[in-house]
Amino acid sequence: MSKSLKPLKFLKPLRSLIKPWKVILFLAGCALFLLVAWIAVCALRVQVIRIAVGPEGGTYDATAHRYMSILKKKGFDIELVHFDNTDEIARRVDDPGSDVDAGFSALNLDGNAFRHLVSLGEVQVQPVFIFSRNKAYRSGVRTFADLRGSSVVLPPERSVTSQAMLEIFQKFRVDQRNTKITFLPLKEAIDELRAGRFDAGVFILSADNPYIVDLATDTELTMNSVSDIDALVKTFPFLRRAVLPSGIYDLERPVPAANVPLIATGISVVIKKTLPPASVYALLEAMSEAHRQATYVSYAGEFPSYAGSSLAVHPLAPDFYRSGAPWMFANLPPGLANLVDRYLIALLAFWFLVGLRQRFEEASCLRLYLIQAWCGMVLRRMDRGLAQGKALSEVQRWMLEKVAHWVDRDDGQVDLKGLLVKVKAAATTMTQPQNRTEQP
């Protein structure tokens, strides 16, 4: 041995203590401990869902807060990301590099342009509200062409409302060349309209939004219904018909005085395709709980619905609407449910292999039992024959060798070994007299 290895001689006494099987068992135990610790960390880690919403006080913001209260009870942490320009929401959710997981959309989105985006379904209908000052429009607004030449206030230019209204205005030749169109933050736009600084304002909000309630009950303003609703719905795919019931805001006056036909747009929840299943099911459950009741312009059970979405629907959504969330996602912690879902196939394969191994072991035990029973039967028959003075035949001697070979390999067959010794001794004793008789 070289001099460089001489200092290691003190390790030689440890070789007898360190057995290979002990090392393997120790490493397996460490791996199992790390696996259990990792599963525990994944199960206990709080899942975060970031939802993109519009300006504070808007319908998107109010809806997301309802989701937040529901999802927090399920163990999720919700972060709201506000956008004044709501047309940015879909792009941010679609961006693989952004930290936004979900958001809202009110327009038909092109699935080819938003490749990383899927829909969980529509959750509500938001009417297009046209409010005008009584002094500016004595007969009210009966068509969007009536707005030409007036001062009109809209939410921020890149909001969904303004993008949709500018597209509709073009059909009526209403633009900034012939009409004073001003874009302001939502709250400021409503305050300025109520203060009389604009002739009219157009907003897409839920019918029960506090801003809409204030505008509808303002005696200086009129809620208008355009006469060409059917033509608008057929021209613009993102529009539909809605009816606001008479007296919904005030039964005594009543406000409104009669049913008001309105154009409206459907609101969808959109998410990243890569959102984990536990988060998807949690959002679907929050949507069902928040929107299953009747609203001012929809019936109970009408929403949420995945019919009518222009985007591809998430593959889990149709099954959820039919039968709800699977037991695993409804009862396990979100992190653990995601973990089980991700490795379920591997776990099933492992379970199958373990079960297959157990079946082989059971088959091997049955084989050993049958061999043991056969050997015992053969030895007992031989013992009875020898006791009656019958010598072993050639076939019996061959069978005795096979039995002896098997019994010698199995240390646990004490009874058979004793019976084997007895039979061998009796066969030998019976053979010796025959040999002496045959000698001349």
Image: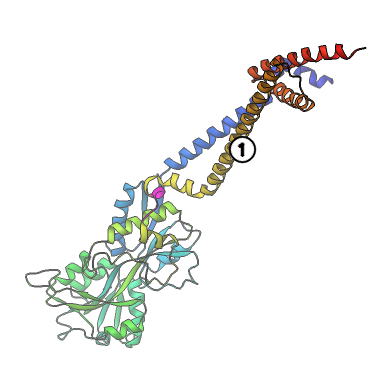
* Image coordinates for residue 299, horizontal then vertical, percent: 23, 68
Q: Tell which of 345 and 161 is nearer to you.
A: 345
Residue drawn at x 67%, y 15% is 418
Above or below residue 326? Residue 231 is below
Where is mark 1, residue-wise?
360
Residue drawn at x 53%, y 44% is 347
Assess whether residue 326 is covered by the magenta stretch: yes
Q: Residue furthest left?
A: 252
The answer, for residue 80, to whether it is visible in the render is: no
Residue drawn at x 52%, y 47% is 343
Question: Based on the displayed image, in which of its 4 quarters is residue 376 positioned?
Answer: top right
Name the quadrant of the C terminus: top right
SS class of the residue under badge 1?
Answer: helix
Above or below residue 237? Residue 25 is above
Instruction: Identify the magenta region.
Output: 324-329
Above or below residue 74? Residue 131 is below
Name the quadrant of the N terminus: top right
Q: Amino acid at mark 1?
A: Phe
